[in-house]
Amino acid sequence: MSYKRIGGTLAAVLAVAGAAFAIYATAPEPICNALEGIGYRPIVPACGLDREQRKQMQALDRQVQAVIRERNAKPATPPRVSRVIQSARDAVDRMTAAALPVEVDALKRIAAGETDAGLQELEALAANKPAQWLRLAHLAYALRSDKALAAYEAAAKRHPLAAWDALALSRAYVHTGQVDAARKILADALAVQPEDAAEDRAVVATALGEVDLLRRDLPAATQRFRTALAARQDLADAAGDDPARQEELARAHVRLGGALRTQGDAAAALAEDRTALVLRQRLADAAPGDNRRQYDLSVSLERVGDGLRIQGDSANALTRYRKSLAIRARLATAAPDRGDWQRDLAVSQEKIGDALSELDDQVEALVAYRASLKIRERLVAANPHSVALLRDLSVSQDRIGDMLFITDELDRALAAYGASLAIRKRLTAMMPHNPLLQRDMAVSYEKVANILKAKGDIAGAIERNKAGLAIVQQLLAADPTNPMWHRHIAITLVKLAQLKGSGVSWSMAAAKWQDLADHGLLLPTHEPAFEGIKALAAAER
C-alpha cells in the first residue's frame, strides 16, 4: 500500500498537513545564511549542514551555548595568537619616544608570546587611561574573549563606539549567549550613524538584523535588512559598475529574501532572489573564470528554484536547479579535492530529485537521489566522523526511501529508512543534546512506521511513531515556545489516531490542533487539514 492508496478525508488531512509541515520545517534557511555574513554562523549547531535540512533550525542550541561559554575562557588557537603577536610587534616598531613605557613593555610582552602578562599590564594602564580600553579590546579579541568583552564594555561606557567596534562587541556578546545585549549595542550604534556613512549603516544594520533573527524577531530583522539594502543600493549607485559593490548589493537582496521567506512572504522573497540572480549573472558573465562569482551564481539559481517550488512551479524550478548543477559540476571537476564543492554538487542532485518527485517523475528522481547518495558516500568515506557529512548521507537515504515507498517497493524503502535511522542514532550518540539531530531521529522512526503500517505491521508502526513522539515531546519540554515542536507533535498525533490500538483518538489530535490555532501557530496551509481533523473527531463521537 502506498501514499496514493489512502483515500477520503484522511488522505486530504495527511496530504495538507504533511505539505504544510514540510514547508514550515524548511523555512528558516536565512538564519544560517545571514549569520554567515558577520561571523555568527559557527555558533548555531545546524549551520554548515546540508542547506535543505539546516532550515529547520530555530534557535541557539542550549548545549552549544554551554560549550561556547566554556570555550571563551580558553586561550586562542595558535594561528590567531600568532597574528596578534605580529600585530603587537608591529605596534612596538611604530612606538615613539612619547609612548608610555608601560604600554611599550606590555606590547613587547605580547610580542614575545607572554600574552596574558601583556594583557594584564594593558588592563592596568586602561584603568587610568580610558582611551586604552579600545587598544586592549582590539589586542585581546583574538586572545582572550573575556578580556576583550570587558574592555569593549568599559570603552562603551565612556564614549559611543564606532560601527566596527560595536560590531566586535556584539559578536563577543553573542558568543557568550548575551543576545539582548548584542542587540542593544548595535541599535545604539545604528542610531548615531550619519546619513552619509552608508557603509557603516549597512554593516551595523545587517548585524542587527542577524541578531534579531537569533531573537526570533522576524519583522524587526526584515526591517533591518531593508535598511542595510537601501544603504548598499546607495553605495552601488555611487560606485557605478564597481563589481565589489554589486556583489555586496546581491548579498543584501539574498539576505532580505531569506527573511521574507521565513515570514511566509514567498512572492516577495522570490522577487529579492531574482534581483540577486540578475546581479550575479551579470557579474559571472563579466568574469567567467572567477570561481567565486560562478559559485554565487549557482547559489542564486538554487534559491530562485526553491522559491518557484514553494509557489508550486516545480518545472521552472527544475530548470534553475539544472543550471546550478551545471556550474557546480564544472567547479567540482576543476577542483576534485574541494570537499565543499563536492558537497554542493550533491545538494544540487538532491534538489533536482525533489523537483522531479513533485512532477511525478519518480524514476528520474530516484536517479538524481542516487547520484547525490554516491557523492555523499564518497565524502563520508574520506571523513567518517563528520557530523555534517553523516547527516547529509542520512538525508539521501531518506529521499531514496521516499521514492521507493511511493513506487510500492516497501522492502527496499524500509532498508533505506533503516540505514538513515542507524546513522541518526549514531549522530545523536555523538551529540545527544542537539535538537536538530534529535528531531531527525524522530522523523526516521516515523518513516519506518509508515512502511510498517503499509506492510500491515500495525503494532510496529505504533511503536515507532510513539518513539518519535517521545523524542519531540522531550524537545518541547526543553524549549516550550518553539513552534516547530508543537507542529511536529500535532502531525504525529494525526498519524497515531489512524492506527487502531494506539491509544490516540481523533479527538486528542483535534485538541492539539486547536491548541495550535489558539496560540496562532497554524499556518494558512494548515487550515484545510484542521477542518478535516475536526470532522474526523466529530464522527468519532
Image (cartoon, rainbow, N blue to C red):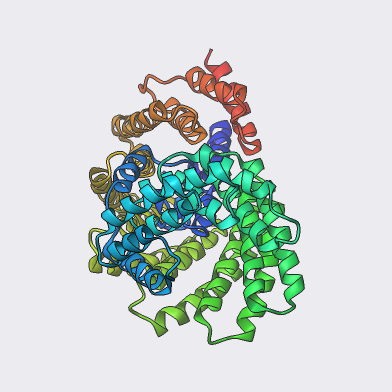
- The quadrant the N terminus occupies is top left
Residue depicted at 58% across the width and 73% down the height? 297
Q: Is residue 475 above or below residue 121?
A: above
Residue 429: image quadrant is top left
Q: How many marks?
A: 0
Question: Of 467 and 303, which appears nearest the observer?
Answer: 303
Q: Is residue 221 above or below residue 94?
A: above
Q: Is residue 393 left or right of residue 236?
A: left
User: Percent from the top left, x then y, of residue 412?
Assistant: 31, 54
Q: Is residue 454 left or right of residue 39?
A: left
User: Percent from the top left, x then y, of residue 98?
Assistant: 45, 66
Q: Is residue 100 visible?
A: yes
User: Percent from the top left, x then y, of residue 223?
Assistant: 69, 47
Residue 368: image quadrant is bottom left
User: Percent from the top left, x then y, of residue 153?
Assistant: 48, 43
Question: Of 140 and 271, which appears nearest the observer?
Answer: 140
Q: Is residue 445 visible?
A: no
Residue depicted at 23% across the width and 61% down the height? 384
Q: Is residue 465 left or right of residue 319?
A: left
